[in-house]
Image (cartoon, helix red, strand yellow):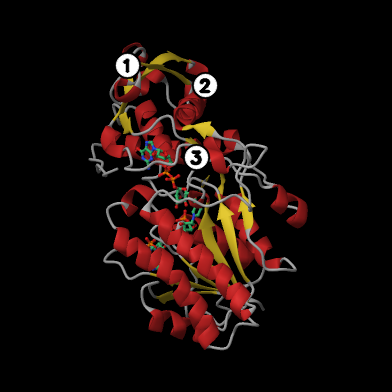
Amino acid sequence: MKVALITGITGQDGSYLAELLLEKGYMVHGIKRRSSLFNTDRIDHLYQDPHDPDLRLKLHYGDLTDSMNLTRIIQECQPDEIYNLGAMSHVAVSFDTPEYVGNVDGLGTLRILEAVRILGLEKKTRIYQASTSELFGGMPENKNERGFYDENSPLYPRSPYGVAKIYGFWITKNYREAYDMFACNGLLFNHESPRRGETFVTRKITRAVAKIALGLQEKVYLGNLEAKRDWGHAKDYVRMMWMILQADKAEDWVIATGETTTVRDFVRMAFSEVGIEIEFKGEGVDEKGCIKSIDKEKYEAATGMSTDDRTTNNEQSMIGKEVLSVDPSYFRPTEVDLLIGDPSKAKNKLGWVPEHDLASLVKDMMQGDVAIMRKDVDLLKAGHEILKQAE
Ligand code: NDP
Ligand code: GDR
């Protein structure tokens, strides 16, 4: 039985990757952080009793800032494959915690590589490093002649997160060259899912749209609506992580859809899933999103409610309603304006065929969030209070 170790198993990608590896028959070890509350929501459906003699998923307490802990876990598991997905992964938050992000996302990668080397596992253990399209920084002059970022594009990170991840990228490459280790970078462009963290822009939008549609929230505040991202589905991307470690040769790979979309258009698509057409008025920080029209049939099919059942407003009061404003506090000190990746190498050499496009991703996320928010509607109707959460 192949053995895998996943750092960041409690995150979006870690949870989908654990599912995939269990399906493939792996023994899966995962590192979770100690937290004052349970933090395993995304993998609770995979939980196995540690006393089960056929146990195939084992969680270890650990942290990427603790090399002794990492070395001990790797020694204990003797993994064939390590997927280093653990990170402080929020670009905006990295401006608030630059030292921490350097320690976890940069030095954390070194700690994994060095542990494998110290334990003499260089020839046994293959390592996947979660690198990122943030390394390209969206610099227009660095795109290839076809207008994409690819494996040969120059790197120019634009945040403490990007700078920490560029250390992770280069130290992975260096250990591959210096010690002949099978260590690969996946330069993955943004990938989302119903399990995406609630403060990343796509999930923030789909949650807010579901709440606005059901009458649980008045409006959403966003930052830069002009930013363009190449958004794929996390399920397709974790399959690539696995394929990268099954390749004949250790290399670095760009994984992307090859299409780019503005945050504004993502908002339009999300509202459209619940039959609501949005129009944008004004410019810059004064830009607003208002409800232009409602397709009642589509609304009812998507929400399972009539527009008149909404908790706060009925259809008439919805038309013209301002549901989106720009809040400059979400702007970043330096922004990555546009990302678009060229996945040709992965498609041609590894035969990667993604199953989702942006439309099916938005549908999947909206269905997930409408289902969650419907439970809140039921709670309210039964006279209970629902909790407000920070964004
Ligand atoms: P998430 O933020 O959802 O998950 C991050 C994981 O890392 C969580 O399990 C988190 O634990 C864990 N973690 C955070 N800090 C530490 C630490 N100090 N020690 C150990 N574990 C830690 O990220 P994603 O799943 O979206 O991304 C996975 C990886 O891929 C990350 O490295 C990210 O930077 C990178 N990436 C992501 C992309 C995307 O679009 N999703 C694109 C390109 C790269 P906890 O649950 O306790 O917080
Ligand atoms: P990103 O993702 O920074 O690309 O990093 P995020 O969803 O946070 O931002 C995407 C773009 O949307 C703009 N934006 C907002 N972003 C957030 N979070 N909240 C808002 O209210 C908002 N309004 C506009 C941002 O300015 C940005 O341009 C993600 C993470 O998963 C990284 O870990 C990963 O490496 C990269 O994707 C690829």
Residue 365: mark in rendering: 3
Q: Residue at x 57, y 75 (%)?
A: 175
Q: Is residue 110 left or right of residue 380?
A: right
Image quarter of the C terminus: top left
The residue pinned by badge 1 equals: 321
Tell how many labels: 3
Q: Residue at x 51, y 27 (%)?
A: 269
State how far apart marks 3 and 2 are (Cα).
Answer: 17 Å
In the rendered structure, which amino acid carries the disc numbered 2? Lys
> How much space separates mark 3 and mark 1, taking CA atoms?
24 Å
Q: Name the element at disc 1.
A: loop
218 or 314, nearer to the observer: 218
- Residue at mark 2: 298
Residue, x 64% and y 63% (percent of image)? 242
Does the residue tagged 1 have its C-beta within 8 Å of any atom of ligand 2?
Answer: no
- Residue 361 position in % (x across, y down): 56, 39
- Count residues near mark 2 (Cα–Cα under 10 Å), then give few for <14, some for 14-19, many for 20+: some
Depicted 268 relative to depicted 2: above or below: above
Q: Where in the image, quadrant-wise, is ligand 1 located?
A: bottom left
Q: Would residue 345 appear left or right of 185 to someone viewing this image?
A: right
Mark earlier in primary sequence (3, 1):
1
For marks 1 and 2, the one nearer the N-term is 2
